[in-house]
Amino acid sequence: MLFQYYLVAALILGLWFGAYRYWRSRIDPDISAGANFDWDLYQRKDPDLLKGLDEASFTSIYRRVETPRGPIHVFYAVAAFLIGAPLVLALNTLIIRFMERTGIIPQPAEQARQLRLTADGIQIVERANLDTLQYILQGWGGFFTFFSLLIFWVIVFYVSMRRLHQNRPGSLREEILRAR
């Protein structure tokens, strides 16, 4: 089952990465045209800025500054989540089983015996059997799994967006000055 999950995840990520590469190949001519235009513009208006740079290195700097980086970072975040989610769920299950065996949290059947829910003063325990209450309590336990996945998702996107903004290049002028 886990192998099938990772196989499907790899297929989805492969298709997504292929679409990204296709998109990237479609915008590369526009980036190159923009680099040529700006190279000519800086040659005429501010030739001192380009001292020590040839057109190939200027194009490389321009490509680094002007190519959108958000899509690849979102891809990395989704890939990390798809790869890590089963591991988080396995860790979650281990923690819950450990807590149940050590008695940190009681078994749902024990909780069901102690539960006294009332609706309009009538005890529901008298009308519902212990199996039903056990299912209710197990359903409440799903919140722990939900919130662990939610926290994992927030951590993955925090790390991804932090990397996106830490590695962000400056303006074209700043990057040219750094490269010289």
Image (tube, rainbow, N blue to C red):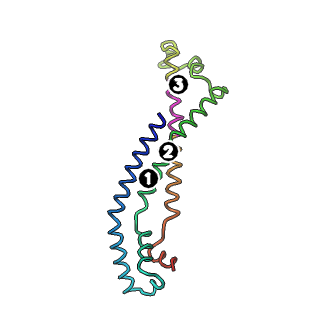
- The residue singled out by tag 1 in the image is 75
Q: Check whether the beta carbons of the residues at disc 3 and disc 1 lie within 8 A of each other.
A: no
Give left or right: position of 85 versus 71. Answer: right
Q: CA distance from mark 3 to mark 1?
A: 37 Å
Q: Which is nearer the eye, 98 or 16?
A: 16
Disc 1, SS: helix
Viewer-nearest of discs 3 and 1? 1
State the residue at coordinates (58%, 21%).
111
Indicate which disc, 1 or 2, sits on the residue closer to the N terminus: 1
Main structural element of the magenta stretch: helix, strand or loop? helix
Tell me: residue 114, above or below residue 179. Answer: above
Residue at x 49%, y 44% (from the top left corner)? 83
Badge 1: how crowded within 10 Å, few (<14), some, or many (20+)?
Answer: some
Mark 1 vs mark 2, CA separation in Å: 12 Å
Dot 2 lies on which element?
Answer: helix
Question: Residue at the location (41% across, 48% down)?
Answer: 13
Number of numbered markers? 3
The correct choice, above or below, for 61 with respect to 117 in the image is below
- CA separation in Å, label 2 and label 3: 30 Å
Q: Of tags 2 and 3, which is closer to the observer?
A: 2
Q: Secondary structure at mark 3?
A: helix
Residue 177 horizontal/vertical position (percent): 50, 79
Q: Determine which residue is flagged by label 2.
A: 83
Front residue (pair 117, 11): 11
> Quadrant of residue 41 in the image?
bottom left
Crowding near the residue tagged with mark 3, few <14, some 14–19, many ≥20 C-alpha atoms within 10 Å: some
Name which residue type carries label 1: Phe
Q: Which residue is mark 3?
A: 137
Tell me the number on the disc at residue 178. Answer: none
Span shown in magenta = 136-148
